[in-house]
Image (tube, rainbow, N blue to C red):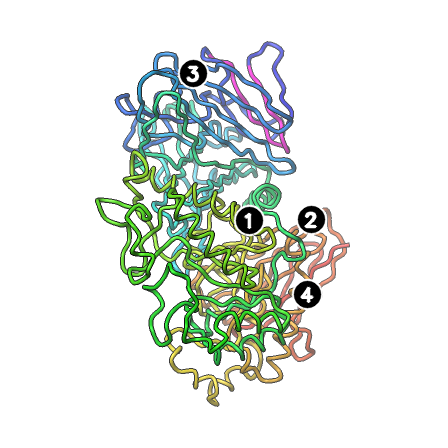
Amino acid sequence: MEVMTQSDQSFIQCLHENMVLRFEQTENGYCQSLLNTDDGRMAPGPIALPGFQLAIAGRPYGALSSMVSGMTSLPSEMKLESMKQADEQRLIFLYLHDKLQLSVEVEMHFIPDAAIIRQSTTVRNDSNRPIVLTHLSSTSIQGIATDGCRPWYDKNKIRVHYCRQSWNGEGQWRSGDLEELGLYPSSVHGIGAAIHFASYGSQSTSRFLPMIVLEDMETGKSWYMQIETSANWHIEVGYRGTSAFNKGALFLHADGASERYGGWTHELLPGESFTAVPVAVGCCTGHFADAVKQLTKYRRSFLKPSHAEEFESPLIYNDYMNCLWADPTTDKLIPQIDAAAAAGAECYCIDAGWFAKANQAWGTGLGDWKPSEDRFGEEGLQGIFDYIRKKGLRIGIWLEMEVCGEDAELGQKPDSWFLMRNGARVGGGPRWFLNFTNPEVREYLHRVIDRLVGMGADLIRNDCNDCIGNGDDQIAHSPAGGLLENMRVFYAFIEEVRTRHPHILLENCGSGGMRSDYGILSRFHLHSTSDQEAYYNNPSIISGLLAAILPEQAGFWTYPYPLLFHEKEQPQLLTTHDYQSSMSNGEQTIFNMINGMCGSMYLSGHIEMADELNWQLIREGVALYKRERKHIRQAYPIWPIGFTRLNDKNGWACVGLASEDQSRILLAVWRLGSAEPYIELQLPNGEGNRKSSIKQLYPSGEQYQARTYYNTYSCKLTVHLPQSFQARYFEVIRE
């Protein structure tokens, strides 16, 4: 980061990774006015304000308060007290409100080697009376897309990219112009509308991913934002200015502390401070994939938890998906463990059900985490752990740390062990939610993990299968405040676990991908991305989530020889002639294995039932994944045909993992139900028209070789797959 001051002190510019963040001198001191690329073509930011929004009880919220959060009134009343460069990467601004005796510190961390600014915003009560906060933004960035000829509201100017989420349907990216999403000129006064994306409760990505990309199609630039919390969050795109004369600009706003979006309030006593949830924002020249590349760099360099590289993205066999479905017994486990080891897996994870009585539902006993006494014979769960270890595999075990079932002994603890709302424990039935602000709860869970690690566990898989909702009304001033505080203490607990057991891996799961934010992912090494059990639906999910999750953290299921959930009581189906015949050409196995090669491979399915052809395809896919892990954990995603919607069974899907200089690309290509046997893939241009070679890496068998043609001039690759629901995995090398 380089800070440059105009000779007449009229403005300051911070230059970082081809980005310019500009601050104008106002009557209240330097205020932020523009974020753009450093290409000399940017227009001055028309409006300068501190880079935050703030509201308190008893004071006017701001203009058009029912519709726009990014225009609160207090920031314009605050004066810059100081600006200091804390080090080569950080700027700290301190703004004061003399009358209210409130101070706000804005720390901007300019991430090395990424066009990203990570902002932390803290408000402090310097008065002698309590103040109730009703809004504190994580950031509010002015002066977005101010250059070019077209006005901000032109349909051919701004394209907003956002990602819808649902259970088993994660990673569904959509795009729209400002008008169709709800932001358009409507008055000679201020614009009374904004575009909103929000989530409420602890399943932070059950509706949207906490990420947005704004693409200026006219100038070829992109702005992007990621908010990092597992509690409530809200992202807003708005316009500040007078639309009749176009004297204004777009702004990006993010918060995780808002009365209007989640019911958050916080009583700030004299001398106390409160810090908003962190957010990352930036801009770059280029389009969606270029924006994702910058966010990927940031996640990889700054957010990803550190662990031993040789244990990064191990090939895990997990016995849940399309396999044992949370009903492990010795008789069922031994064949799976044997097959996993023979296939080349490196870790065997026993999923849910290991604590439940045989032939009983496992849900309502969550929380005690005592091995079942009637599932694993005389040697018990320890005997299974020992058998896994003898097979040369690391040991994984499933937990759902944050809950307690009504039938568990833990449920007899006092209410102080649980989150409370409206005088009752939050949840019920299978899941009451534990109160991690209670140190006894944290110590109890530490003892559980200590015991499992002492038995030999190398990996703890933590699931989150329900939503806390509005929060807890005992911990903080508001339920939403209680939710945020509980999640922050849970984060600290996970960091304690990592310190206590530095050799183990921690895996996050959120009923699939319902908690996929980087508040949680910055604490867990791996992430289970979806519970989707239909293999042909996974390419859509995989390609979408690679925009939001590091490839090396993103666990993608591959489950040859699946036994679907509604068939779980009929294992005899696996031996029928029709089932075996459906697998005989190997194409379903190939499709599955390629799914897992796009990130961190999670192997499952009844692979012990595989015939010789499919067994060799499984072994080959496992070996290839292990060879390519180094590339995957340094790669950036590309989308040669864009995104494929989950229910588009009549098309194709494709995603690539490219080296930073795009000299090598691993390319997964799936033909779904398309009637067209050819697809044309637009590869990145790279640096000039370099000589390129295309090689099919998987499957390698002669009978599976696909025909391809690469047009060097247009950088287009044509692939021929003659049958529906086929997949192939290619390597593109550019010299």
Residue 201 is situated, as x and y percent measured from the top left of the image, at 34, 46
Specify the label residue 96 is tagged with.
3
Residue type, label 3: Leu
- What amino acid type should be assigned to the residue bearing mark 1? Arg
Quick one: which residue is furthest to the bottom in this view? 577
452 or 192, which is in the foreground?
452
Magenta residue check for 21: yes
Q: Gap in Å between the C-alphas at discs 4 and 2?
A: 18 Å
Identify the disc placed on residue 686. 2
The part of the image, by quadrant, that contains residue 457 is: bottom right
Task: Indicate the position of residue 114 as horizontal and vertical percent values.
Answer: 62, 38
Which residue is disc 1 drawn over? 500
Q: Residue at x 46, y 25 (%)?
A: 51
The mark nearer the N terminus, 3 or 1, is 3
Q: Are marks 3 and 1 in contact (CB under 8 Å)?
A: no
Q: Mark 2 or mark 1, which is nearer the start of the sequence?
A: 1
- Where 221 sits versus 732, above or below? above
Label 2 sits on a secondary structure element that is loop
Quarter of the image that includes the N terminus: top right
- Crowd class of label 1 (few under 14; some 14 to 19; many from 20; radius 10 Å): few
Which comes before the other along the chain, label 4 or label 1? 1
Q: Are marks 4 and 1 in contact (CB under 8 Å)?
A: no
What label sits on residue 677 in the rendered view? none
Q: Position of residue 327 (x, y in %)?
A: 42, 73
Regarding residue 197, the answer to whether it shows in the image is no
